[in-house]
Image (tube, rainbow, N blue to C red):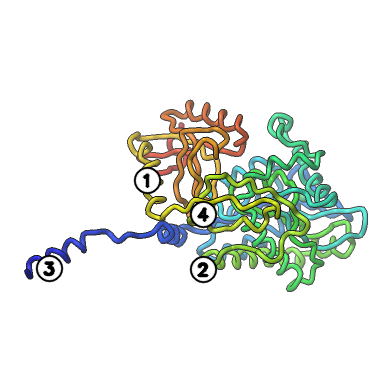
Amino acid sequence: MNTCRFAFFFVLLLIPPLSSFTKNNTELLQKDKFVVVLDAGHGGHDPGNLGNGYLEKNIALQIVLSAGRELEKDPDIKVVYTRKDDTFVDLFVRGKIANEANADLFVSVHCDSHSSDAHGAGTFVLGLHANRQNFEVAKKENSVIYLEDNYEERYAQYDINSPESVIGLTIMQEEFLQQSIYLGKKLQDNFTKSLKRKDRKVEQAGFIVLHQTFMPSVLVETGFLTNKNEGGYLNSTKGQNEMGKAIAKAIKSYKADLGSGLELETPKEKVEDSTVDLNIPKETSSTNEKVSSQETKPKETKPEETKVVENTEVASNTTEKQEPTAKKDVIFKVQLMASSRNINLTPGNFRGLDMLSKEPYKNLYRYMYGNAESYEEAKRLKTKADAQGYTTSYIVAYKSGERVPLKSVVK
Ligand SMILES: [Zn+2]
């Protein structure tokens, strides 16, 4: 009897604790640094706007460097810059830097201009232009592509002169819309309450640079250089440091809320006048969904029926899909997207692509296409993904089932 009981407890000790997927996520979150990509707009032969003779490229850089200095004081934050000096960086490269860094946030910093004496600070997230004014801001910032080589090929999918052209482009960032707006509101709070800048609110518009990234992303228009007072403020060291610190403070606050497990939603105050069709895949499961996107759905649309999957099932599905990777030494895949949603791996949810896999990463799922044994084959898969509209997808590598930097396995 005693032996029996002892054996029973011994067996209990051998069973590993059933940790939920959510717990694993939290552990991952604690282990990794919070990566922030700071993107100073323009640079090099692209000065940005020249209101009152000031240089947008210099002001944006100084604000970014100030924000970076502040963020780097936090040992849990890693700051990645798209540029730290006066160099020209292609728009698509800015997004690539952020994606390859697996960043948690992307913050692009700019200054606005206008023929009137307009002033104030505003934050943009990617979405449909709610009005002509927002469209014009995006058009101005997007026009930098004309300064890049091969822009006609590279940005063939964008027609920056057409207000409608952005509709098909918002899908990627929709995954992060709520988080982006959440950060945007914190930024605006700091600009307006602490620094008394005029509140131009969080708005949506079709910025190409925001369409390139796979993480919550915002573009800050810190103010108007064309306005005499505001231009002078932004061109001053005091103004640049204050704006930089305000940006850093908002990012830290966002990170703290994320770490505390708060649902990053902005349910009551919506982005003004915006209607965004979120195009949620029908098979989407609601389990582990961090961000509710229901709030921004048009009223007429009935909520999609969601299938609830048990945590254990999620975990086993994920393991199952990763198995083929573990068998080969080096495997290449094409990462299509990352999302807070647990999306079923059916071709219908991925524009007809098959050979899909997913893996949890931080508080997201990464979605990959293909299972190639050579880099050449992976490049062919990337071309196929591009053709299906996943133009910001990129090749990733695995060694013995673990994701490794591409550079470490490709000569
Ligand atoms: Zn700009």
Task: Tell me the quarter of the picture where residue 250 sits.
Answer: bottom right
Which marked residue is nearer to the observer: mark 1 or mark 4? Answer: 4
Cα separation, mark 2 vs mark 3, equals 41 Å
Mark 1 = which residue? Answer: 319
Residue 139 visible in the shown view: yes
Which residue is found at the position 73% from the left and 42% from the top?
166
Q: Which amino acid does label 1 sit on?
A: Thr
The reply to whether callout 2 and callout 4 are in contact (CB within 8 Å) is no
Which residue is found at the position 50% from the left and 49% from the top?
342
Give residue 55's position: percent from left, percent from top. Answer: 81, 52
Which marked residue is nearer to the observer: mark 1 or mark 3? Answer: 3
Using residue 64 as the reference point, say whether residue 227 is left or right of it: right
Disc assigned to residue 97 = none
Disc assigned to residue 260 = 2
Mark 4 = which residue? Answer: 286
Using residue 88 as the reference point, say whether residue 224 is left or right of it: right
The reply to whether callout 1 and callout 2 are in contact (CB within 8 Å) is no
Disc assigned to residue 5 = 3
Residue count near mark 2 (Cα–Cα under 10 Å), binned few <14, some 14–19, many ≥20? few
Using the image as rendered, state which of residue 197 and residue 305 is in the foreground: 305
Q: Which amino acid does label 3 sit on?
A: Arg
